[in-house]
Every structure is written in structure tokens, then in C-alpha cells.
Amino acid sequence: MIVLGIETSCDETAAAVVDDDRQILADEVLSQVAEHSPYGGVVPEIAARAHLENIDVMVSRAMKKAGIGFAELDGVAVTGGPGLIGGVLVGVMCAKAISCVHRLPFLAVNHLEGHALSARLCSDVDFPYLLLLVSGGHCQLLIVEGVGRYRRLGTTLDDALGEAFDKTAKMLGLGFPGGPRVEKAALDGDESRFSLPRPMKGRKGCHFSFSGLKTAVRHAISALPPGRISERDAADICASFQAAAADVLADRSANAIAELRSSHPRAGTMVIAGGVAANRYLRERMEKLAENEGFRLIAPPRNLCTDNAAMIAWAGIERLELGLVDDLDFAPRPRWPLDANAPPAAFAGAKA
Ligand code: KG4
Ligand code: ZN
């Protein structure tokens, strides 16, 4: 079984071809960083136009690289949401056209499901497992019970962790996208220099909150002597920020492991996914946590953590194998929670 995947929900125009033997035959990603950089963040209108300009080229490139024709495909999978709706529309229309012309099954994939199942593309991982999904728009702990079966244990009450990374970078003048730049700056930093808060640490449950941490970073920066922020200051703030974020992730994940154990006593795997899961420092911390808990940690390769179409093609394969095909009247969804039954998080403003 061979599936073409398309991803356009944020600022990467991506197309990939994957087979059911877990071979990635092509994995093409075109980043729009240069277009968005001057604005310090993703501008939805610019993103949508850039996707429109590039999607055909990316699909052709992926098919060429895979060395196959459309007739050899068994399906076309596309991110159907959640995400910036202009971009999602571009991807969905492209996938529908290919599906229609070549009479292929059409699979609308939840972007978060793409991240959630990416571990099964790169490793032997059976259901159920614990998933820590940390990206630019989401920060959640979920039990993955099967394809399409997710139980959310916790989510963020305010900012996603990727957002906090991006804002920290912006405040320090490190540029965009912030996550990788904060990680790089932190390599030379002293994580004990600034004592930053660990929001929610020690509390019951699995929810997160990062706005207080972001505010504390802002206060730490404004308390520095006036003038340009030195490289040393920036490195120390980044290291202190990362250490605080890692403590919070480890604390919340330990609670989630306990919850997973109580409902699924034989489960023993934790997966991290999403753009922030590309961070080496956080990966190491989660590795230690898993080891202490007697769990196996699966962290997909970094290029499968940040947005890509291989994970969408793979989720498409998993869905196709179960006969979960979509109709061509599928409407793109700006919001699409993985667990529609999750109780709302405790405070107003929590993200789905
Ligand atoms: O999953 P993703 O590529 O897009 C979304 O679905 O949101 O995640 C993007 C987020 C951004 O906030 C980016 O700064 C963050 O992931 N990110 C990182 C790293 N690489 C990307 N955060 C921390 N360390 C990294 N190395
Ligand atoms: Zn993502």
C-alpha cells in the first residue's frame, strides 16, 4: 500500500510518499521561514498564498523522488485541520483534485493524529501508549488507545510550549522560529543563573500553563542592565527557561504515566511528538524520566517531529487499513480536537 501525504496547516508546504512497510519513499518539506521572518511570526495570509504557489511543485517533486506515478498510489492523505484555515484549504483542494482525477481514496487526517502516530512509522509501538504532544499550537498529554481513539489527560491552560519558546526568542531578539534558536543559545548557558517559575509543578493532574513562565522571562530581561542583551545573558536566560520547561514536562508526564498505569497496567511506552520534541535537551530529560519509571521512550527523528507530510501519509495508511476513508465533501477544520469528549480544562481560555 502506497499513500501520498500532503501537509499545509502552518508554514511548511510538504508532500511525502510512504508505504505500509514503513518506507518513506519521499519526504519533501518547503519551509516559509524567509517569508515570515520579517514579521517575527507566521502571517496566515502570506502562508496561504505561499502554499498555493508551491503545493503543485512539492507534490510533483515527491512523486518524482518516489519514482512512481499517481496510478500506483492507493490513496491520498491530507491534513484536514486543525491549523491556519487558508493553508489547510489549499492542501485539501489539491488532495481532492488528485483523488478525483485518479480515482483514489481520499483521507482527511487530523494534523495532531499525524504527530500522534508518527512513532509507529519509525518504531514498533503497540497501542496503548502515552503521548506528550508539544508543538507551536498544542501542549497535551494523551493516551493513544488506537487509530482515532485518544483520551486527553491534560492540556495547556494558556500558551503552548512552542509559543513560549518562540516568545522567549523574540524577547531576546534571537529571531524566528524561536525554538531551535533558544535550544542553540542555551547550549552555552548557565541554567541556574535565573530562577524561573515551574507553573503547575507539584499539582495534581496533567494540565500545563506557560504564560507565567513567559512573563518571568520578560521580567528577567527587563531587570538586566540597560543596553543590548549580551550573548551571555541570552544564553543564561535560554538555559534557565529550558530547564524550567523540562521540569514542568517531567512533572506533568510523571502524573500522566501514573494515570496510564491505572487504566492500562501493562502499558509501558511513552512517545513525544510535535515540533518542540525536536529539542535535544527536552528529549534527554524525558528519556531520564521514562527510565526512572521503567518506561520506554520513543522520540521520532527530529525531522519527523517538526511538521512534515510523511506523518500525514502514514496516518493515512493506518486509516486506510481500517477502511476509514473520507468523502470528497469533507470541510477543512480550523479546530479539531483529538479527543472531542475531553472535559474542558479548569480555567477559561484553555485550548482544545
Ligand atoms: O509541530 P510544529 O512543527 O508545528 C505545529 O504544529 O505547531 O511545531 C512548531 C513549534 C514552534 O513553536 C517551534 O519553535 C518549535 O516547535 N520547535 C522547537 C524546536 N524546533 C521547533 N522548540 C524547541 N526546540 C526545538 N529544537
Ligand atoms: Zn505540528
Image: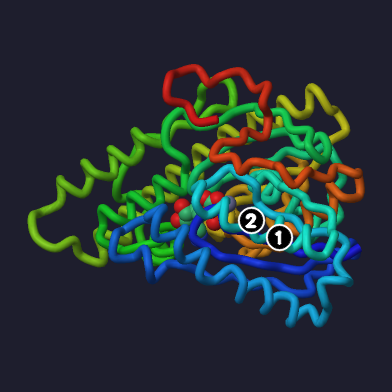
Residue contact at pointers 1 and 2, CB within 8 angstroms: yes
Residue 39, x across and y down, in percent: 29, 59
The colour scheme applied to this rendered structure is rainbow
Quadrant of the frame with the C terminus: top right
Is residue 236 placed above or below 259 in the rendered structure?
Answer: below
Classify residue 277 as left or right of residue 196. Answer: right
Residue 132 sits in quarter:
top right
Could you tell me how far apart the alpha carbons at marks 1 and 2 are, in whole angstroms? 6 Å
Residue 147: x percent and y percent? 82, 40
Residue extending farthest to the left is 226
Q: Which residue is mark 2?
A: 93
Quadrant in which residue 325 is drawn: top right
**Residue type, numbered disc 2:** Met
> What is the crowding at mark 2: few (fewer than 14 residues within 10 Å), some, or many (at least 20)?
some
Q: Which mark is residue 97?
A: 1
What amino acid is found at the position of numbered circle 1 in the picture? Ala
